[in-house]
Image (cartoon, helix red, strand yellow):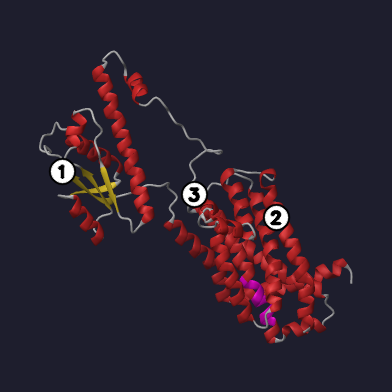
Amino acid sequence: MTVQTILKHSLRIAWKDLMELFRNRLGLVLLIVMPLFMMVMVGFIYPSGGASISNMPIAMVNEDAGFNNSYLPSQTFFSTLQGINDQTHMMTLNSASSLEEVTDLVQRGELSGGIVIPSNFSQSILSGEQGTIIIVTDQSNPQISATIQAVLSGVFDGMATAMAQQNVLLMNPALNSSSALAVVKPLNVQSQGVVPGNPSYFDFIAPGLMAMTVMMSVMTGLPVAISHEKELGTMDGMMVAPVNRLSILLGKTLAQTLRGLIQGAIILALAIGIFGVAIQGSIFLVFALLLLGVFSFVGLGIVITSFTKDQETAQMLMMTLMFPMMFLSGVFFPIQQMPAFMQTISHFLPLTYAADALRKVMVLGAGIPQISTELIVLTAFGIVMIAIALPVFRKMMTR
């Protein structure tokens, strides 16, 4: 049988599988709704802005001994904080009488945190010592707690710098504001990324979601495409037809590839159109990586499906493999934050390299030379799995 005939039969089988999908209205709706639901849900959980807080209920406690004196540093501090908050709307500021009351309100869920000025704050400042500010946070929500600490610490650091700058000017009127700032803060630290802009955490997640969705589409679609036809008996009809078995495998693979690419394109469109994700690199390279990701997952899906006797077992086995892979491949959390042994496991998962490559292209604007390692690993994994899948699939067809 010629190569042209094999390809012709493969396209017919792929078309048959796609027509079955298009006739199944519920399946077609789910094909579109699943990436839509996933992106919208995750997109609003991880908003496009950077780490910030908005209208967080925060209590202010002033235990300073002479807090009624408006000239004391504690009162000046709270007045300045109130002015900043009126512009930024970071917090909804409330009053509390003590640290114990703040703790009680946080435990009740009525506050997200508190700001406490100890009783010796003004005395310390006026005597030339450091004044202490206590930030109380809700440790049951570590992410919000860390964000509140980071934002408030930045605000207070800016306020402290302004106070020190003013003190320097009072002691040395000959200095100007810039010179006084250089005395107080001699280092001017500037951060700069490798690409313009300030990507958010959602920019980190979006490429991983694309790779994960393509993987899930292929891995869940293959049991239906192969095991389901075995159960219905239609696979026997293909076996007795004058069709090369390689054509059957290629046709099934082409149909699942197109299905995965459709869902990947939907996620990409939602990421750009709704959540403002900027593609710094080549859009063609993004789709090439999605195609390569499909290629690397297809062989594994065929092997697993060929070893199982029915569709239900195949899908259960697929899900058993997919869920650990989702969390160990750096889709939602950086691999560097995982324990060392989990990082080692992640390096053996193809989804890790697919997500990393997409992230480098979409977020950092990388080209082919910068993702050569990922390309080599995905290609090699796909070739090895296809090489294993072909004889396994032939053996399954003869059972």
Q: Position of residue 73 (x, y in %)?
A: 19, 33
Mark 3 burial class by Cα count in 10 Å: few <14, some 14-19, many 20+ = few
**Amino acid found under the numbered disc labelled 3:** Gly
Placement of 25 over or under 80, stated as above or below: below
User: For the residues marked 2 and 1, what is the alpha-carbon distance in whole angstroms?
Assistant: 61 Å
In the rendered image, which quarter is residue 269 located in?
A: bottom right
Q: Is residue 118 left or right of residue 242?
A: left
User: For the residues marked 1 and 3, what is the alpha-carbon distance in whole angstroms?
Assistant: 45 Å
Q: Position of residue 256 (x, y in %)?
A: 67, 68
What span is in magenta? 220-229
Quadrant assignment for the C terminus:
bottom right
Mark 2 or mark 1: which comes first in sequence? 1
**Amino acid found under the numbered disc labelled 1:** Glu
Q: Is residue 6 left or right of residue 121?
A: right
Quadrant assignment for the N terminus:
bottom right
Residue 11 at least partly seen: no
**Amino acid found under the numbered disc labelled 2:** Val
Mark 3 or mark 2: which comes first in sequence? 3
Relative to the observer, which residue lies in front, 114 or 368? 114
Name the residue at 34% across, 52% down.
145
Name the residue at 72% across, 86% down.
233
User: For the residues marked 3 and 2, what is the alpha-carbon distance in whole angstroms?
Assistant: 30 Å
Which is closer to the viewer, label 1 or label 3? 1
Picture disc at residue 63: 1
Mark 1 burial class by Cα count in 10 Å: few <14, some 14-19, many 20+ = some
Which is closer to the viewer, label 3 or label 2? 2
Mark 1: secondary structure: loop
Q: Which residue is mark 3?
A: 276
Mark 2 burial class by Cα count in 10 Å: few <14, some 14-19, many 20+ = some
| Residue 227 among those drawn in magenta | yes
Name the residue at 28% across, 46% down.
135
